Image (spheres, grey):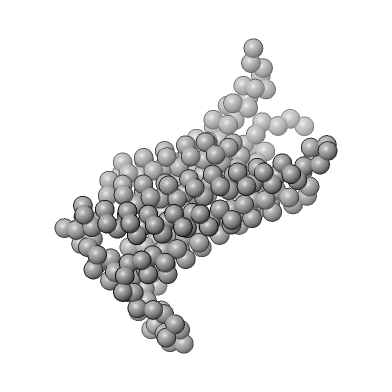
Amino acid sequence: MISDIDKQITIRKTVSIAVLTAIAILLVFLRVRLPFISGMFGIDFSVFPELLAAIAFGPIAGIVVCLIKAVIHIAFIPTALIPDIASVAVDIVFIVFAEILYSSHMYMSEDEDMVIKPFEREKAIFFSSIISVIPALILQFFLTEFFVYPKLEKYYSNEGLTYDNILANYAVSTEFLRNHFPSLAKSIPDFKGIWQGVLFVNLPLAFIKYLIVAIVTMVVYKYISPFFHYRQD
């Protein structure tokens, strides 16, 4: 027979995952565009609630939040299907690796009385997230170069998403940097292939996103964790 505490835990988990899913849906529509980057590129922080769900309730919860967010986003913006497939894959790699590393580290950090050392959770969240950026960025590079852009050109070339136009969008970013930072002009390469744009534009933007998410998660998790889990004094 299920106890009242077990029921409360189940309800709290369900509600928490639902709230995190709603936040992820909101954030995916609030893309941040930097002034020196072409409007084609932007950052959304919807991976933040996905990471919270994975750390709090396990990787399956984070994946559920990620998939529901993507389905809703594609329902409203059908042209986002191809980029969102890649984004989902990259985000899942990030949150799954982060949760596995976090759980492993926290297990080793507990003393004989199952007490977590001070600041150990914050350190575990940050470093687990930063390490997980590496496989996520590697996957993003190959998916963007060999899946996203070829598919976009195949299905949306009539709407201007051709190889040359995509490359031109990367050139806009380099021209801005050359004009506003003359001292860096010689070190900024001319993009002769989309792979260079992915390497020097997409991946740095993704790294900034994941770094911000790691820092924010590290700071806020200890404050919101009691709301995720049914705890009694």
Q: How many marks?
A: 0
Give how far across and how far down residue 24 sits, in percent: 46, 45
Residue ID at (54%, 32%): 15
Q: Position of residue 124 (x, y in %)?
A: 67, 50
Q: Is residue 81 above or below residue 173?
A: above
Furthest toward the top, the residue is 1
The residue positioned farthest toward the left in the image shown: 158
Q: Quadrant of residue 32?
A: bottom left
Q: Is residue 14 left or right of residue 153?
A: right
Image quadrant where one finds the N terminus: top right
For residue 212, what is the image quadrant? bottom right
* Residue displayed at 36% across by 47% down: 85
The residue shown at (69%, 47%) is 105
- In the image, is residue 192 above or below residue 127? below
Residue 7 point in image, percent of width and height? 62, 21
The reply, left or right, for residue 116 in relation to residue 21 is: right
Could one spot residue 103 in this view of the protein? yes
Residue farthest right in this picture: 112
44 or 104: nearer the viewer? 104
Q: Looking at the image, can residue 35 be seen? A: no
x, y percent for residue 53: 55, 40
Q: Quadrant of the C terminus?
A: top right
Q: Which residue occupies the foreground of this view, 2 or 110? A: 110
- Horizontal arrangement in the rendering, residue 31 relative to residue 116 (left or right): left
Name which residue lies at 64% across and 55% down: 127
